[in-house]
Amino acid sequence: MSIAGMFDLHGQVALVTGAASGLGLAYAEILAEAGAQVVMTDLDMPGLRAAATRIGATAAVMPDTAELDVGDAERLATVIDGAAAKHGRLDIVFANAGISAGRGFALSPDGELGNLDHANWDKVLRVNLTGTVNTMQFAARHMKAGGGGRIVVTASIGGIRAEPMVGYAYAATKAAVLNLVRQAAVELAPHKVLVNAIAPGPFLTNIAGGRLHREPDVVAMFAEMVPLGRIGLPEEIKGLALLLASPAGSFLTGTVIPVDGGATAAV
C-alpha cells in the first residue's frame, strides 16, 4: 500500500462529537482533509456551522452538522442513527465531547476533596463518562452491522496519573474511559471494530471556558509539567487522529496513546 493509500479516507463516513472547537475541530479538519464525509456535532451551533463552512471551503465534501448534547442519550442515538442512515454507513467515530470539572486542588481550595461539589460531579459524569459510553454503544451497532469501523475516544493524561490541576470528576471520568476502551476493544475485535484512546496532555482548547487562552499563569503552570516546556496546539494531535482512523492503524486496538510533550514520561 502506498503512503497516500495508508491515510486515505475517501468514501468513509466519520462522526465527531464536540467538533466546534479545540481537539474535536482538529479531528474534523484532518478527517475531511483525508477525504472522509464528516458529521460534526456540538452544542455550540454558531461555532459549529462556522467551523464546518471553513472546512467545506477546501474539503472534497461539505461536512454535515448536528446540534448534540452527548449526555442526552435519546438525542445522541438519533444523531448517530441519522448519520448512518443518510450516508448508508458509519466508519469512524471520535467520542470527543467533554467538559471540565473545574480547578484541581493545586489551583484552588474548591478543588479539594472535602469541597467536592456533588451536582458538578453528576454533571461531568453525565457528559464525560455516560456520554462517551453511549457514543461508543450507538456507533458500535452500525459498525458491527457494516463489517468494521474505528472508535477513538478522547481521554486525558489526567486519567493515567494523578493530576492536581484538574478536578476530581474530570480525573475520575477520564480514568474510567480508559478501561471502557480496553473492554470494548476486546469485545469488538472479532467484528473488526477497532477501539483506541488518545490521552492528551495540556492543550490550548476551549475546555474550562478557554481558561488557557486568557490566564497566562495557568498556562505557565501546565507548561512546567511538560518536558517540552509548553502546552500543545490542536494541530499537533491531527497526525495521531489520522493514524487511528485510517488503514495505517489497522493493527491498533485497545491502546491508550498519550500526546503530552513527555509529561507522563517525566513522572
Image (cartoon, rainbow, N blue to C red):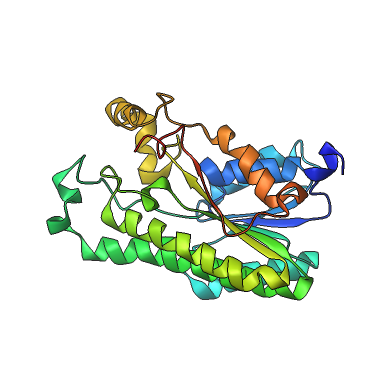
**Is 238 displayed left or right of 171 in the figure?**
right
> To which quarter of the image does residue 203 belong?
top left
Q: Quadrant of the N terminus?
A: top right
Residue in the picture at 40% in, 23% down? 229
Residue in the picture at 67% in, 72% down? 81
Task: Depth check: give the residue in front, 105 or 57.
Answer: 105
User: Residue 86 location in percent, x, y?
Assistant: 77, 67
Q: Residue furthest right?
A: 1
**Is 18 displayed left or right of 158 in the figure?**
right
Q: Quadrant of the C terminus?
A: top left
Q: Is residue 52 visible to us here?
A: no
Residue in the picture at 37% in, 43% down? 209
User: Residue 212 location in percent, x, y?
Assistant: 37, 34
> To which quarter of the image does residue 35 belong?
top right
Q: How many marks?
A: 0
In the displayed structure, would residue 211 be above or below residue 20?
above
User: Residue 170 location in percent, x, y?
Assistant: 34, 54
In the displayed structure, would residue 193 be above or below residue 23?
below
Task: Depth check: give the residue in front, 55 or 230.
Answer: 230
Q: Is residue 255 visible to us here?
A: yes
